Image (cartoon, helix red, strand yellow):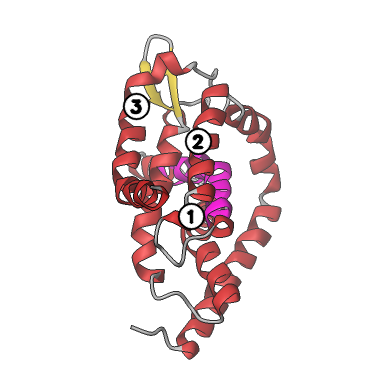
Amino acid sequence: MIVQRSFAIAYMLVWSALVVIAAVLAVRERKAIAASAPGYVKSLLVPWKLCAFTVAFAFFVFAAPYTGDPTWDWKDGGLMSLCTYLTAPWAVGVIARSRGAARKKIAMKKPLIFVAVIAWMFSASWSYDGYLFLRDGRYPMSWAANIPASSALYVAAGMLFSLVHVKDRGIVFDFMTEEWKLTPRSTFGKIALPATILIVGVALALSPFVVSVVQSMK
């Protein structure tokens, strides 16, 4: 099914406006975001996370020509991978904490929730859509199917890179702690089991592409 150009342009205008609004809100809420920024950046620099990201980034970039998917090249693969690594732990954490706050009837800043949702959608969908529109001159037919597929990977990445081991509590997601983004970082050995389960789940989801790559390189 061909995506009508009128729909494509209207949809892009809508999501572009939402991205701009989110950027404005992020600037407005910069104090709340900046307060946790040092801890968040530090959490992304944990060696096992950098290693996992490097492997995933390399796959999405260098496997692109061999997957048989015309919408997947090294540029959108690299862009989506980088955006996911930089934003998923924060966005998934904000959204998860907002649900917990709602259950406990605790006020949480709605602008931050909006920014988190837009960061999610831009990383998992709109960056892909926009790039392909610029590259091909038409909106990708796979835009709708890509949203749930890439969102699943986005959530998995957010969960994986949020795993921590807390003394007297065990393995939890960082966003479940009161000291979110300030919780001491954990070595891979302490969170190995759930991390491995998430990694294997992602690998299984990507296995058809892995098979295509292997067959193409023979």
Query: Where is residue 197 shown, x and y percent of the image?
Result: 30, 30
Q: Which residues are magenta?
A: 77-97
Q: Find the distance from the CA under tag 2 to the CA under tag 3.
A: 14 Å
Element at label 2: helix
The answer to whether residue 56 is seen in the rendering is yes
Element at label 3: helix
Nearer the camera: disc 2 or disc 3: 2
161 is higher (above) or lower (below) than 115: above
Nearer the camera: disc 3 or disc 1: 1
Q: What residue type is disc 1 on? A: Ala
Residue 80 within the magenta-colored segment of the rendering: yes
Q: Residue at x 34, y 40 (%)?
A: 203
Q: Quadrant of residue 97?
A: top left
Residue that lies at the very extreme toward the top in this rendered image = 168
Q: Residue at x 69, y 39 (%)?
A: 34
77 is higher (above) or lower (below) than 184: below
